[in-house]
Image (cartoon, rainbow, N blue to C red):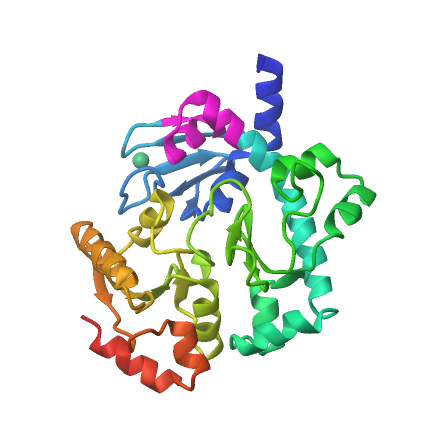
Amino acid sequence: MNRHALDELKQQIPLMGYLQAHDWSPARPLSGGRWMGLCPLHEDHKPSFLVDTNKDLFYCYGCGRGGDVIRFAELYHQVKFPQAVAWLRQWRGAEPLLQEAARFYRILLHRHSEAVAYLYQRGIRSQALIEHMGIGYAPGGCLRGWLTQLGHSLPALRQAGLVTSVGYDAYVQRIVFPLEGNLYGRSLSLAAPPHRFLPGSKGGLYAWKQVQSHPEVILVEGLFDYAVLWEVGFHNVTCSLGTHLNAHQLRQLCDGPRTVYIAFDADGNGSGQQAAQCLSRSLWERGITARVVSLPEDHDPNSFFVQGGDARQFQSLLEEAQ
Ligand SMILES: [Zn+2]
C-alpha cells in the first residue's frame, strides 16, 4: 500500500470514531479538540490517554505510546503493521454492508412465522426485546439480490462473508443478531451447524456500553441467555458469545472495579462450568471479583427461564454464587 492509500485509509477512519466503536469514551475535554480518557492499551485508573481529534493522533502519558489510528490498531489488536492496515481496510468496507444486511434481515423477521415461532419457543417474545437486540431473520436466497440492487458489489459481499464464494447467501434459515463488526446466525435447521459468525472477530462483549457502569455484571455464554435475562429485568447482563473470551473481551471485563457473575451452561460434560472456573481464576488474578453461578444440571440461563424459572429464583442463584 502506498503513502497516498494509507493517508486515504486514515482519513476514512477518524481515530475518535474507531476508538468509540471499541467502547472508548472520553472522560473530559481539553482545549482545541483534544480529549482525555482512560487508556485502552494499559490498565489505567486515572485518565492518561490523550486524543487530538484535529491531528487524529493519540498519546498515553501512562504507557508512553502514541500515534495514528493504524498504530492504535497495531497495539490494540496486537498485530503487526500490515495486519493492522488489512484489519482497518476490512473494517471500513464491511461495517456499512453489515448494517445494511442487518436492517434487511430485521424487516424479514415478521414475514416468516417459523422464525417468530422459534424465538417464542426460546423465550424471546416481546417486541421491545426484539428491537433492543435488533434481531432479524435470514431465509436465504434474497440478501445478495437486495444488496447488489442497492449498488454493493458482489466482491464486497464476498469479502464481508455475506455471500459464499459460489455466490449464495451465507446465512440460510438463521436467526440473525447484529454484533460489533459481525453478524451471529443461529440455524433453525438441524441439518446445519447451529452457531455461525461471519469471518473476522466476534468483537467485544455484547452491549458492553450499556453494562459497563454497573458495579455487578452477569456474564453469559449465548445471546439467547442474554435475551431471557434482559427480558425479566436483569439489564446488567452481557454475553461473551462462547466460553472463551478474546483478549478484547477480557480487557473490557477488567476495565474497572466490579463483580462479575459468570452464568455459563451447566452442561452434562461439565465444560461450561470448567470454563467458568478457569475464567473466574483469571479475573481474580486481575483484581476483579468473580463468582460462578451454579445452574441446575443440564440448564443454561435460557432453558432455566423457558422452563419456568423466574427472576426471583435466578436472583437467589446469584446470591448463592461462589
Ligand atoms: Zn496507556
Residue 127, located in which quarter of the rendered image?
A: bottom right
Residue 238 place in picture, x, y as percent: 41, 62
Q: In which quadrant of this rendering is ligand 1 seen?
A: top left
> Which quarter shows the N terminus?
top right
Quick one: which residue is furthest to the front in this view? 191
Quick one: which residue is furthest to the right in this view? 149
Residue 45 place in picture, x, y as percent: 26, 47
Magenta-colored stretch includes residue 168: no
Q: Is residue 245 above or below residue 18?
A: below
User: Residue placed at 58% from the left, 78% from the top?
Assistant: 125
Residue 207 place in picture, x, y as percent: 47, 59
The foreground one among 154 and 141 is: 141
The foreground one among 248 and 264 is: 264
Q: Is residue 57 above or below residue 105?
A: above
The foreground one among 1 and 241 is: 241
- On the question of residue 264 being in view, the answer is yes
Q: Is residue 34 above or below residue 28?
A: above
> Which quarter shows the C terminus?
bottom left
User: Image check: 77 left or right of 89?
Assistant: left
Quick one: which residue is furthest to the top in this view? 2
- On the question of residue 55 being in view, the answer is no
User: Residue placed at 62% from the left, 76% from the top?
Assistant: 117
Magenta-colored stretch includes residue 80: yes
User: Residue placed at 60% from the left, 70% from the top?
Assistant: 130
The foreground one among 273 and 216 is: 273
User: Image check: 316 left or right of 168?
Assistant: left
Residue 172, located in which quarter of the rendered image?
A: bottom right
Q: Main secondary structure of the magenta part?
A: helix
User: Residue placed at 28% from the left, 46% from the top?
Assistant: 46
Query: In the image, which residues are magenta?
Result: 66-87
